[in-house]
Amino acid sequence: MISRGFQTRLDIIKERPLRYYRTTGLTQAQMQELVLRVQDALPEPWDKKTGRPKSCELYRAVEIACMYVRQNSTQEFLGDLRDISQSTVSRIVTVLVPIIKTELMEFVPTAQEAVEMVQGRVCLVDGTITPCWSYDDHDELWSRKHGTTGFNAQLICLLDGDAVYISDPLPGCTHDAKAFTTTPVAEIVEKSGGGIGDKGYQGCGIVTPRKTPPGGELSKGDKANNAVISALRAPVERLVAHFKSWRIFHTDYRRPYRTYREAYDAARGLFFFSITWGFE
């Protein structure tokens, strides 16, 4: 039999909101701010005080939506973690992810804002694949380079690693050089003090390492030059790693294809919100 005091401590632990950055991707203050924004944006109160009560309060629901994006966990796991059903988690994700996307859109730099940030400064460019399931009738998602289906995202940062711009997702078959010109990335880099990229951006007008010629080898000077370029590119590699610490960008996206863009935009908004809000 559980004593009353022990049961009270259990209740306190159960009701305590999550505050771990690695769990939700946000600090406690950021989570509180996001909950307030979501509450104001809801078309009707989360808890109407009439009819069947919600399985969890709004704070917990926003936590679950953030955990879904941050960890890309299965809905069954999130349900077990919060003692609610998988269907409840599905409804939470369906309702709150689009709202989170809309409320955090202001934190995602536009192309024009990115241009203002890079003027007179050297910027670094890199592309990455955000994997997803192999959906029927979407062969364009297959990336031969990465050997998986997904979407191509282009990222720009400064030499100090500050994130400048993250593009909209393109089909996984898109080569980085084509993505460079298809997205606003080319315009942003053109207005900067110069750009540096990897070998995938050769011919795009930015500094890139030299490729080994067919049947030959690089000179000592070329090897030394490539080493310098690789060292300069380290901050954008770290940016990609930070971006993909939001596991929805790192492991297969499992929900229907039609929901991907909203999830991507919400995760991108959460990423920029997490590195800007509260640090002004």
Image: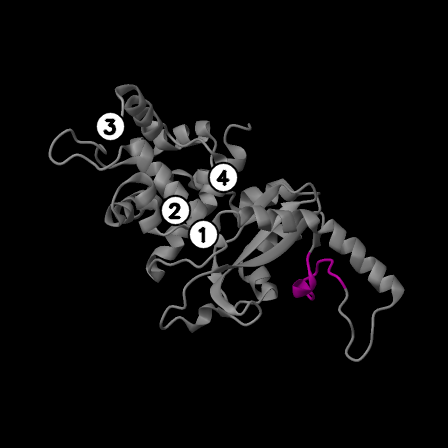
Label of residue 149 in the image: none
Q: Is residue 191 visible?
A: no
How far from the left and from the top, in percent, is residue 257? 35, 61
How far from the left and from the top, in percent, is residue 146? 56, 67
**Residue under pointer 4:** 22
User: In what element is the residue under mark 3?
Assistant: loop
**Residue under pointer 1:** 248
User: In what element is the residue under mark 2?
Assistant: helix
Q: Amino acid at mark 1?
A: Ile
Q: Tags 3 and 2 in contact by the CB under 8 Å rule? A: no
Q: CA distance from mark 3 to mark 2?
A: 36 Å
**Residue under pointer 3:** 1
Q: Amino acid at mark 3?
A: Met
Residue in the picture at 78% in, 75% down: 213
Q: Tags 2 and 1 in contact by the CB under 8 Å rule? A: yes
Judge whether 171 appears above or below 232 on screen: below
**Residue under pointer 2:** 68
Q: Amino acid at mark 4?
A: Arg
Choose mark 3 or mark 2, whichever is in front: 3
Choose mark 4 or mark 1, whichever is in front: 4
The stretch of residues the image draws in magenta is 197-209
